[in-house]
Amino acid sequence: MIDYNNKKFRPFANTENGDTDAETIFEYKQTGNVLTSDYSGGKIVSGHLIGVVDDHGKIDMRYHHINIEGEIMTGICNSTPEILPNGKIRLHEKWRWTSGDCSDGESVLDQI
């Protein structure tokens, strides 16, 4: 299992319907297979996610945040890790809003 505890991530890429961008910082905490993160920056005023990490480091998570428009947004996301040559983690994410237009998207987060 990959240990995400105390690691920070920043979006490298995101589809247009996403709220996160390069200014958004995720601060991951992990205890056992339970993952949490606070995140903010860019279009995000305040956000939180909670998830479960499997034996291969894949994350099944739910998230919610308040964006700069004052909207409460919610969603579901599945992240698959890739270990880069420098030893850092890159997360390939497939997500879906469960609020708003309920559209799908994809993003890539890099460990910083």
Image (tube, grey):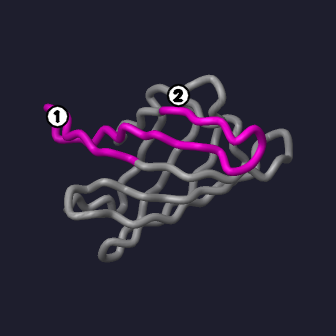
Q: Which residue is mark 1?
A: 86
Secondary structure beneath disc 1?
A: loop
Residue 86 % position (x, y)? 16, 34
Residue 98 % position (x, y)? 68, 50
For the view shown, which residue lies furthest in the left direction?
A: 85
Res. 51 image quadrant: bottom left
Residue occupying the point 39% across, 66% down: 52
Q: Is residue 23 above or below residue 52?
A: above
Going by the numbered disc 1, the residue's amino acid type is Asn
Residue occupying the point 28% across, 44% down: 81
Distance in Å between CA atoms under marks 2 and 1? 22 Å
- Location of the N terminus (image quadrant): bottom left
Q: Which residue is mark 2?
A: 14
The region drawn magenta spans 79-106
Tell me, yes or no, whether the highlighted magenta stretch contains residue 94: yes
Going by the numbered disc 2, the residue's amino acid type is Asn
Chain-order first, disc 2 or disc 1: 2
Q: Main secondary structure of the magenta part?
A: strand
Judge the density around disc 1: few (<14), some (14-19), many (≥20) Cα neighbours within 10 Å.
few
Q: Is residue 110 above or below residue 54?
A: above
Residue 54 % position (x, y)? 28, 63
